């Protein structure tokens, strides 16, 4: 059994939560239950233009009314994100059938690559529908989530430290040569050298604002 687990991209766009009317505007696809054709493994890198989802896709989700969700078999039905009935997980599968029982809307969902449909879910478990799929980008979130993510973070920090050390070296060269030119023309010393150099862009600060 393959369940499609999705991971929340850390600290992603607080504004888009409002714009897209959902708590989960951006998610990363973590398993291959939507992969086509059925029964073939999803490596997460091929099929960038397929009309379904693959591991490592970043999906943009919009909160919509259940009545606005179009349910139909592959490939026409909307792909929806919902709370799993039995586990504390989010699932993203296609809505293949819509039913109304005692005034409550229910959806039957199915992974495009699964042979059987999921048990039906009431509309109040639905978070929204997938309005955009960006191949590959979600791999970043998936890597961060597992244990090897820590090495990626360490590597990024190392790169940022190197950038911070290198940028001042380069940016301080220009003012020095300019001040040398100036000293030939005017005796009044101007502030020069590294102190007058433009402070390097604080890349690390920018980065960590968006980190978890
Ligand atoms: Zn795939």
Image (cartoon, rainbow, N blue to C red):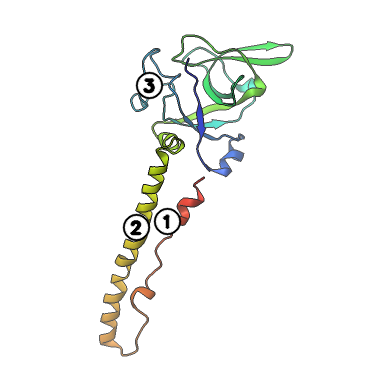
Q: Residue furthest bottom?
A: 187
Per the image, label 2 sits on a secondary structure element best described as helix
Residue at point 29%, 71% (across, down): 174
Residue occupied by mark 2: 163
- The answer as to whether callout 3 falls within 8 Å of ligand 1 is yes
Residue 6 placement, left or right of 122: left
Residue at point 44%, 39% (across, down): 144
Q: Quadrant of residue 124?
A: top right
- The answer as to whether callout 1 falls within 8 Å of ligand 1 is no
Task: Return the x and y of residue 62 as percentages of the image width and height.
Answer: 57, 31
Q: Quadrant of residue 177?
A: bottom left
Per the image, label 3 sits on a secondary structure element best described as loop
Residue 139 placement, left or right of 123: left
Is 109 situated above or below 209?
above
Q: Residue furthest front?
A: 147
Contact between labelled residues 1 and 2, with CB atoms less than 8 Å apart: yes
Is 36 situated above or below 127?
above
Task: Tell me which image quadrant ligand 1 sits in.
Answer: top left
Classify mark 3: residues with Cα within 10 Å, few (<14), some (14-19) or many (20+). Answer: many
Q: CA distance from mark 2 to mark 1?
A: 8 Å
Residue occupied by mark 3: 42
Q: Which of the two discs, 1 and 3, labels the residue nearer the N terminus?
A: 3
Residue occupied by mark 1: 203
């Amino acid at each position: 059994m393959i369940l499609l687990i999705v991971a929340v991209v850390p600290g992603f766009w607080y504004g888009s939560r409002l714009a897209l009317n959902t708590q989960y505007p951006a998610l990363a696809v973590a398993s291959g239950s939507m992969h086509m054709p059925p029964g073939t493994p999803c490596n997460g890198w091929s099929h960038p233009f397929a009309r379904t989802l693959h591991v490592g896709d970043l999906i943009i989700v919009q909160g919509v009314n259940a009545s606005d969700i179009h349910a139909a078999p592959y490939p026409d039905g909307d792909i929806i994100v919902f709370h799993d009935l039995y586990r504390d997980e989010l699932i993203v599968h296609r809505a293949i059938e819509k039913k109304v029982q005692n005034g409550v809307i229910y959806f039957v969902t199915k992974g495009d690559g699964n042979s059987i449909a999921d048990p039906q879910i009431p509309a109040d478990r639905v978070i929204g529908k997938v309005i955009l799929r960006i191949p590959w980008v979600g791999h970043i979130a998936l890597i961060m989530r597992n244990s090897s993510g820590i090495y990626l973070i360490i590597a990024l920090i190392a790169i940022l430290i190197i950038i911070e050390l290198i940028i001042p070296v380069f940016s301080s060269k220009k003012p020095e040569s300019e001040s040398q030119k100036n000293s030939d023309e005017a005796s009044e010393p101007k502030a020069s050298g590294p102190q007058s150099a433009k402070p390097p862009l604080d890349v690390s600060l920018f980065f960590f604002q968006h980190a978890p």
